[in-house]
Image (cartoon, coloured by chain):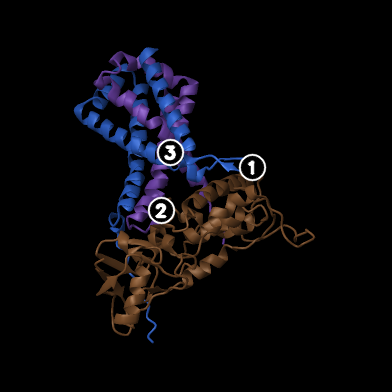
Amino acid sequence: MTNRPYIRPMPNSWWLREGRYIRYMARELTCLFIGFYAFVLLVGIYRLSQGPETFDIFLAALWSQAGLLMNLAVFIMAVLHSVTWFNLTPKAMPIWIGDKQLPGWVIVGAHYGGWLVISVVALFIVGGL
Amino acid sequence: MSERQITLEVLRYRPELDDEPVIQSYIVPVQEEWVVLDVLNYIKDNIDRTLSYRWSCHMSVCGSCGMVINNTPMLSCKAFVRDFPDTIRVEPLHNFPIERDLVVVLDDFMKKMTVVKPYLIPKEPVAEVDGTYKQTSGQLKRFKPYAMCINCLACYSVCPQYALNEGFVGPAALALAHRYNVDSRDQGRSVREDVVASNEGIWECTFVGACSEVCPKHVDPAAAIQQTKIASTMDYFMDKLLLGKKKSGGVVKQVEGGGA
Amino acid sequence: MARSNKPIVWGLFAAGGTVTAFLVPVLVLILGLAVPLGFLSPTDLSYDRVFMVVAHPLGRLVLLGFLTVSLWHAAHRTRTTVHDLGIHSDRTTMLICYGVAALGTVLAVIFLLRL
């Protein structure tokens, strides 16, 4: 009998093969938007250091049509990042109380709850201060 | 009851005949209660004696009959034909070299399973009078899900990192390491970490999570690996930064408790 | 086999993933969408108010931490994703990704100190 194992190649498009891989890749690509937004904030801080006029130019750009599209894209991908991140927390950080494992939905729910509180409080502070 | 006929498409590879795998179709009359393995056995007995595949227990215990059925790796003895359309595609597990037809080469996994030291490494030999270790049901619960692995290798078949990174220890073996690390009777975590926390261990994992989705025994290797990442990161900073000790290099200098 | 030094970058990745998951959506909402959408008035983000928050020592510290973990989270995930997509010269990828993150971190320190 011939011993000649066949190795199936792994194409670079492997992640298009199944829905789960496409979802994984979408999750991973959120990081580009997170990183990009950090640089947007860096520019904002730089403009802030230059005085009110330049800061207003920065805000005008941020609220221009192109800026809004960018913000919307970052927002959507950031939410995707949050959702995928929180949903996986029970696997990475299971909580045991005595001999009982806390159900995963409690851990996920606590993260969503914290997320909601932080977001609402932040909006309230900025809007109502 | 009218008899159902299905077409089983099998990815075949006969090294003496084929340069690369080819699809061969078989038309098979099936019974309501049949699983895909029954179809393969029918073909072997009645249509084509040359078809090669592994199986043993026919009851989801031995893990021999793992194969890719309609793009998803599963145990063919657990895949009921009634849950599938009339054409079913059967392939060998992905990410392993194909030996012949549905039989893959397992050498790489066998090696990786042993390097994680999948056995109890106690601090002291058992002291109980009857020679057994005492363990509460609560302590058992911590590791039992990770002890259910039957090495069917469905997890390796869906793990892109196993395919992309030569040397990656992979989901089942890392879950097995975790199984012993969280066993109250075991003190060998730091010994295993020399492999588990190396570049070829947990750090190749990017938490795709597919391994846990396809596991027929609900082992959840993805969870085991992420928990190991957190534990190893803690160890790293404790060892290298806070205490100024260097522990890398593979020699056991200290045996410590095996927390999650 | 030697133990990996990955915990350094993975630790930053995990910290950044958690911090950004909680903060980035609401941050983008406030800074980039709430004014045009009418939830906030432009005066809520006036220079004086923003400067007061950002230039406060605590504000600078929080922002530096936030930006650092955001950048390193993105850098580490980008590195593994580039590898996933079939570019296997990991050393080059690593230098570029972590290099950009390091540059961003340095810029954050400089910009925040200059306020």
For mark 1, give the secondary structure.
helix
Residue found at x 37% / y 13%:
A128
Q: How far from the left and from the top, in percent, is residue B199?
A: 50, 57
Q: CA distance from mark 1 to mark 3?
A: 30 Å
Q: Say which of marks 2 and 1 sits in front.
A: 2
The chain displayed purple equals C
In the image, farthest residue toward the bottom: A1
Residue ID for mark 1: B242
Residue that numbered label 3 is attached to: A86
Q: CA distance from mark 2 to mark 1?
A: 38 Å
Q: Is residue B104 visible?
A: yes
Give me the chain that's blue.
Answer: A
Instruction: Tell whether label 3 touches label 1 (CB within 8 Å).
Output: no
Amino acid carrying label 2: it is Glu
Secondary structure under tag 2 reads helix
Residue that label 2 marks: B213
How many residues crowd around disc 3 within 10 Å: few (fewer than 14), some, or many (20 or more)? many
Residue at figure coordinates x 44%, y 59% from the top left: B216
